[in-house]
Amino acid sequence: MAEQSKEIVEKAFEAIELAKTSGKIKKGTNEVTKAIERGTAKLVAVAKDVNPPEITMHIPLLAKEKGIPCIIVDSREELGSVAGINVPTVAVAVVGEGESKKVIKEIAEKMK
């Protein structure tokens, strides 16, 4: 899993927060995997402090296959709090962009 710049990670968090309030997000390995497979995910964030790593190993590969930007973030706790839940989460997908559309487009451009 490639390391992302701090700037891209911050943008991903911004997109998730915007989508949380104005669009729709999916949380957790199963929900995120389904969103990617169905092609509804616009942006995916995966925590790298997952134990065992096999839990989320398939997500970046699936996202790449479907052409969905996938951001690797440092911690599950941070990802959980950005997603607006009180527990850590290993993966988050933005499925309804809402106001985060512009930010997601920016991330996609930077990752090309």
Image (spheres, rainbow, N blue to C red):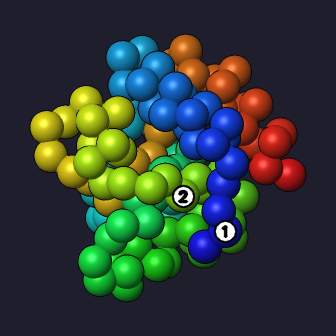
Q: Which residue is mark 1?
A: 2
From the image, tell me which residue sits under label 2: 72
Residue at horizontal 49 percent and vertical 69 percent from the top: 59
Q: CA distance from mark 1 to mark 2?
A: 8 Å
Compared to residue 11, the image places residue 79 above or below, namely: below
In the displayed structure image, the side of residue 30 where residue 15 appears, left or right: right
Query: The residue under label 2 is which amino acid type?
Result: Ile
> Which of these two is toward me, 91 or 1?
1
Residue at the image position 66 percent from the left and 54 percent from the top: 4
Q: Are marks 1 and 2 in contact (CB under 8 Å)?
A: yes
Residue 37 visible to the viewer: yes
Q: Label 2's element? A: strand
From the top left corner, tell me how far across and down residue 102 is, in percent: 69, 21
Left or right of residue 50: residue 108? right
Residue at 46 percent across and 20 percent down: it is 18
Quarter of the view holding residue 46? bottom left
Q: Is residue 21 left or right of residue 10?
A: left
Q: What's under tag 1, amino acid-wise? A: Ala
Q: Quadrant of residue 72?
A: bottom right
Residue 41 circle label: none
* Secondary structure beneath label 1: loop
Task: For residue 68, say whether it is visible.
Answer: no
Q: Nearer the viewer, residue 63 or 103?
A: 103
Q: Residue furthest left?
A: 86
